[in-house]
Amino acid sequence: MHVTWRDASAYAAWAGKSLPTAEQWEKAARGTSGRPPPWGDQKTAAKCNVRETGVERRTSVSRYHSGVSPYGVYDMVGNVWEWLASPTAPGRYELRGSAFTSPLFRGVPARRSGT
């Protein structure tokens, strides 16, 4: 939370990594079958940290084991919004995943939110 795209990108570079592109994010969330949310067709707040869980704060990344993506990635929906490398406009980049304050219906990996 409260991390700018520039800060996230600099941290990834420092760690020898990069922010994912929109295409990489989609594959990590959906797997090769293209299923809707990372856990398949059965969307439920019990598999992610969204408003309906009532937690009302960030949680550790490994808390929701049943919500892990086919590639073993946690928190593809809920917890905190995550920056992507994909620009939406000059100087603006895509966010994905939703946050613990987001309602469950917004928790779709394919939904774009640029800022």
Image (cartoon, grey):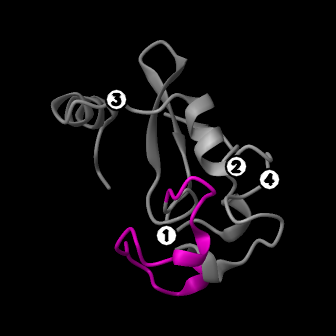
Please report contact status of discs 2 and 4: CB closer than 8 Å, yes or no: yes
Question: Along the polypeptide, which appears first: circle 4 or circle 3?
Answer: 3
- Give the percent coordinates (x, y) of residue 97: 56, 53
Extreme residue in the right direction? 41
Q: Earlier in the sequence, mark 3 or mark 1?
A: 3
Nearer to us of marks 4 and 1 is 4
Judged from the image, the secondary structure of the residue bearing numbered disc 2 is: helix
- The residue pinned by badge 4 equals 35
Mark-to-mark CA distance, 2 and 3: 20 Å
* Residue under numbered circle 3: 18
CB under 8 Å between discs 1 and 2: no
Q: Nearer the viewer, residue 90 or 97?
A: 97
Residue type at numbered disc 4: Arg
Quadrant location of residue 26?
A: top right
- At which x and y percent is residue 33? 80, 47
Q: Secondary structure at mark 1?
A: loop
Side (left or right) of 92 relative to 88: left
Q: Nearer the viewer, residue 105 or 45?
A: 45
- Which label number is shown at residue 32? none
| Residue under pointer 2 | 30
Find out whether the residues at labels 4 and 3 contact each other: C-beta distance under 8 Å. no
Q: Which residues are magenta?
A: 51-73
Quadrant housing residue 4: top left
Residues under labels 4 and 1: Cα distance?
Answer: 22 Å
Q: Which residue is mark 1?
A: 100
Disc 1 residue type (three-letter): Phe
Going from the N terminus, do you reach mark 2 or mark 4 first?
2
